Image (tube, rainbow, N blue to C red):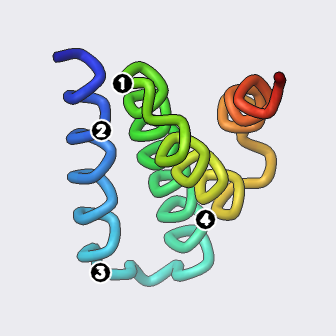
Amino acid sequence: MVFEDLVKTGQETLEGADAGALPSDASAAWRQMRATRAAARYAAGLGYLGLHDDMRARDELSQALQERPDHLGARTALARLKRP
């Protein structure tokens, strides 16, 4: 149940981030949206890891890194997936 909730929360956060309007400081809003999307992808990736769905976990974690290349959690989790 915990892992399903992580996936659900990540997906719901992504839907909300995509629907948000940009405030007057668009560059700050853009950075915040990318951080939110990265965190949501990371949460979903952790959920998929817990559900033993490595392929979907790898996809979500990779997308988190596309949003925020400096996301240490996503980078670490993805590296653990790549180990034999």
Q: Earlier in the sequence, mark 1 or mark 4?
A: 4
**In the current view of this chain or complex, which residue is farthest to the left?**
1
- Amino acid type indicated by mark 2: Val
**In the current view of this chain or complex, which residue is farthest to the front?**
84
Badge 4 crowding class, 10 Å Cα cut-off, few under 14, some 14 to 19, many 20 or more, is: few
Q: Earlier in the sequence, mark 4 or mark 3?
A: 3
- Amino acid type indicated by mark 1: Leu
Give the alpha-carbon distance from disc 2 to disc 1, as whole Å: 10 Å
Taking the spot 36% from the left edge, 24% from the top edge, the residue there is 51
Q: Earlier in the sequence, mark 3 or mark 2?
A: 2
Question: Can you identify the residue that label 4 sits on?
Answer: 31
Give residue 21's mark. Answer: 3
Where disc 2 sits, the SS reads helix
Give residue 15's mark. Answer: none
Q: Quadrant of residue 84?
A: top right
Name the mark nearer the viewer: 2 or 4: 2
Name the mark nearer the viewer: 1 or 4: 1
Taking the spot 16% from the left edge, 17% from the top edge, the residue there is 1
Asked whether disc 3 touches disc 2, contact meaning CB atoms under 8 Å apart, the reply is no
Q: Is residue 39 above or below residue 23?
A: above
Residue 62 at what x, y percent from top left? 66, 53
Question: Can you identify the residue that label 2 sits on?
Answer: 7
Q: Earlier in the sequence, mark 1 or mark 3?
A: 3
Q: Earlier in the sequence, mark 2 or mark 4?
A: 2
Give the alpha-carbon distance from disc 3 to disc 2, as whole Å: 24 Å
Residue 46 at what x, y percent from top left? 47, 28
Give the alpha-carbon distance from disc 4 to disc 3, as whole Å: 13 Å
Name the mark nearer the viewer: 3 or 2: 2
Question: Can you identify the residue that label 1 sits on?
Answer: 51
